[in-house]
Image (tube, grey):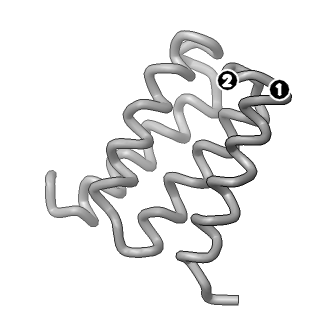
């Protein structure tokens, strides 16, 4: 409904639950981290989105592998958020 900050808050709560219940390497936990980073950027924190996505990428490469579709998607979003943050 246009509430990016509210989405960030909700995703932070969901991430805490998923990490506790499913573990930090579960695909649903990784997906929640991706969504949280995206919405953090949409809420105006492009640099925070880049940092979160870079941390996620390292974990995805280790857990899923460097050629996994989710890993490749994260790499693409890092480039996009770097551009938005003015760091490219």
Numbered disc 2: secondary structure = loop
On the image, which quarter does residue 54 sit in?
Answer: top left
Give how far across and how far down residue 86 sits, in percent. 15, 62
Residue positioned 78% across, 37% down in the render: 18
Question: Residue under circle 2?
Answer: 24
Residue closest to the far right: 21
Categorize mark 2 by other alpha carbons within 10 Å: few (<14), some (14-19), many (20+): some
Label tally: 2
Residue closer to the observer: 80 or 30: 30
**Where 44 sits versus 68, above or below?**
below
Give the left or right position of residue 47, taking residue 77 as reference: left
Residue closest to the far bottom: 1
Residue positioned 47% across, 63% down in the render: 40
Question: Residue under circle 1?
Answer: 22
**Where 26 sits versus 83, above or below?**
above
Give how far across and how far down residue 79 sits, in percent. 33, 48
**Quadrant of image for the N terminus:** bottom right
Residue closer to the observer: 29 or 13: 13
Numbered disc 1: secondary structure = loop
Give how far across and how far down residue 12 sits, in percent. 62, 53
Residue positioned 64% across, 16% down in the render: 64
Give the left or right position of residue 3, taking residue 49 as reference: right
Categorize mark 1 by other alpha carbons within 10 Å: few (<14), some (14-19), many (20+): some
Give the left or right position of residue 79, taking residue 28 as reference: left
Which disc is residue 86 wearing? none
Residue positioned 75% across, 50% down in the render: 14
Q: Do the residues labelled 1 and 2 touch (CB within 8 Å)?
A: no
On the image, which quarter does residue 36 sit in?
Answer: bottom right
Q: Give the spatial CA distance, label 1 vs label 2.
A: 7 Å
């Amino acid at each position: 409904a246009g509430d990016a900050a509210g989405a960030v808050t909700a995703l932070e709560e969901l991430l805490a639950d998923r990490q506790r219940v499913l573990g930090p390497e579960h695909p649903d936990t990784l997906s929640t981290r991706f969504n949280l980073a995206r919405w953090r950027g949409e809420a105006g924190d492009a640099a925070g989105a880049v940092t979160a996505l870079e941390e996620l990428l390292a974990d995805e490469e280790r857990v899923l592998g460097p050629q996994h579709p989710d890993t490749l998607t994260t790499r693409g979003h890092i480039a996009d958020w770097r551009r938005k943050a003015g760091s490219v």
